Amino acid sequence: MPVNDIDAPQRISADHLIPLIPGVIFQLHLARNGHMRFPYIEGGGEALKHIDRDLLSQNAGELVEQLTGNDHPKIMSAIERSARWMLPLTTRFLLPFPKEKPHWIAVSARPKTVADGVQWNGIMMDISDQVSEEQRLRKLSDTDPLTELPNRRKLMVHLTNIASLSTRHGTPLSIMMIDIDHFKRLNDRWGHLHGDDVLKQLATQAQSLLRCEDMIARLGGEEFMVVLPLTSLQHCHTLADRIRHAISVYDFGMGAGQVTLSIGIAEFRCGEPLTSLIERADQALYTAKDIGRDCVCLLR
């Protein structure tokens, strides 16, 4: 029985398909003397409209540096590593657009040795939507939804890194444990919605008194922690008392003096476990509550 031509699949040529794909197919050549060029680059999307392909085919070095900006050292390092070990080239960079926000571009290519250097055949894809979603999910996993401060998870990662630097360089590091006095009583009297508003305003006020390198995070409930790199116990005490006083005179919509803080502080001992540091700050916090609240206590 003869084959019906209508039902036969149509063949689509690569030349017709490539301009329609949401990305770029490329060939990159790196000569032994370091000269870099793109003998072939074709694809769809907006990126190629703003790029001089003739220049890329002759000498790509300067243009690649302009297009990749701050990511250029990372890109070149990935290319050199791929060329040296004949490993797949996988990286990403931020590509500027004349009238739009920059787009994230992912690169994936395989190298092969050629007579005068190394040649890669690969693709570049716009992954801006993917990166935006990654950032959104990361923020959700790292941020307290009420106060928009870092949560316990993010704080512990940060504290671990800062403690490592403190141990390596012998620099001071201190922390504060902050607790709102009689917060349950405040909730019972003014309502939980007002209590939530107090937490949000407290986060804003405390942040305004800290340096950009300091981190305040909500641990849960009415408890917060502040990580202060390059800060001795004495300076930490001064700052903690400044925060305590600022909150005690701030009007949270209930009149000044209705919200006070108990704060415990401790300084990192080089190489000690972080659990020990946090426990000492916690003990200092309990001491502050035991002696009457609205004060700062420390444990050396």
Image: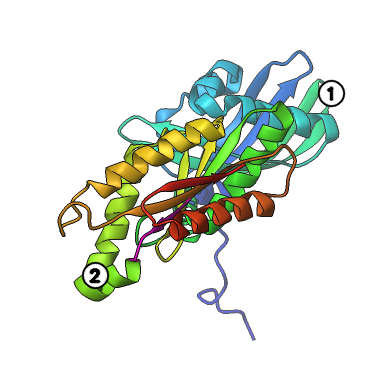
Query: Magenta stretch: residue 2 in it?
Result: no
Label 1 crowd (10 A; few <14 / some 14-19 / many >=20): few
Which region shows up in magenta? 177-182
**Relative to 66, residue 219 above or below:** below
Q: Which mark is residue 215?
A: none
Q: Main secondary structure of the magenta part?
A: strand
Instruction: Provide residue 173's location: percent of width, then percent of height.
Output: 59, 36
Residue type beneath disc 2: Leu
Residue type beneath disc 1: Ala
Exactly how many numbered labels are in the figure?
A: 2
Query: Magenta stretch: residue 180 in it?
Result: yes
Out of 105 and 254, give the one closest to the viewer.
254
Horizontal placement of 88 versus 100: left or right? right
Instruction: Provide residue 253's location: percent of width, then percent of height.
Output: 15, 57
Task: Name the residue: 18% across, 51% down.
Answer: 256
**Relative to 109, residue 153 above or below:** below
Q: Mark 1 vs mark 2: give the one in front.
A: 2
Q: Residue furthest front?
A: 291
Residue 176 in view (yes/no):
no
**Residue 102's image quarter?**
top left
Instruction: Provide residue 194's location: percent of width, then percent of height.
Output: 22, 66
Upstream in the sequence, badge 1 or badge 2? 1
Residue under label 2, please give it. 193
Residue 137 in view (yes/no):
yes
Here the colouring is rainbow
**Residue 255's image quarter?**
bottom left
Out of 145 and 54, give the one closest to the viewer.
145
Q: Which mark is residue 115?
A: 1
Task: Name the residue: 55% across, 21% down.
Answer: 65
